[in-house]
Image (cartoon, helix red, strand yellow):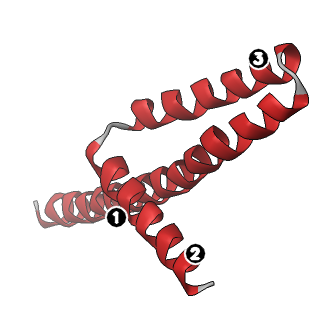
Amino acid sequence: MYQLSAVMAWCYNWCLTRAERMPRWQGYVIEILAALGLIAVAILAPNWVLFTYWVIVCSPVSVFGAAHHSVWKKRDEIWRDQQNQLQKTKSLIGRSK
């Protein structure tokens, strides 16, 4: 059980480092392509291929999606804080004139 959690943590950290380097749209493209592939496999392929695709492709993509979401949530929060501080500074400068 420890080995499984160690591998999962390593996988998440690897996805997190990749997600930090890429723009937001690339992460969305990866997730959308995986979803479209799942739909295509669900319609066209037998059940065992669907299950294999789900385990091999969709599981890692969902881990990557979670890492990508957390990175961009943090970046959006930083940007929002910077904008709030800029507005406060502008209002203080405006009052001092």
Precedes in sequence: disc 1 or disc 2: 2
The percent coordinates of residue 26 (x first, y second) are: 41, 31
The amino acid sitting under disc 2 is Leu
| 65 lies left or right of 46 | left
Q: Which mark is residue 57?
A: none
Precedes in sequence: disc 3 or disc 1: 3
Q: Which one is in front in this view, the residue at disc 1 or the one at disc 2?
A: 2
Residue picked out by circle 3: 40
The percent coordinates of residue 22 (x first, y second) are: 31, 40
| Residue 80 visible in the snapshot | no
Residue picked out by circle 2: 4
The amino acid sitting under disc 1 is Asp
Q: Residues within 10 Å of mark 1 (few under 14, many from 20)?
A: few
How far apart are the two marked residues, 1 and 2, measured between alpha carbons? Answer: 38 Å
Q: Quadrant of residue 14?
A: bottom left
Secondary structure of the residue carrying numbered label 3: helix
In depth, the one of 39 and 41 nearer the eye is 41
Query: For the point 26% across and 46% down, which residue is it?
Result: 21
In the depicted structure, whether residue 15 falls above or below residue 35:
below
Query: For the point 83% across and 18% down, which residue is it?
Result: 45
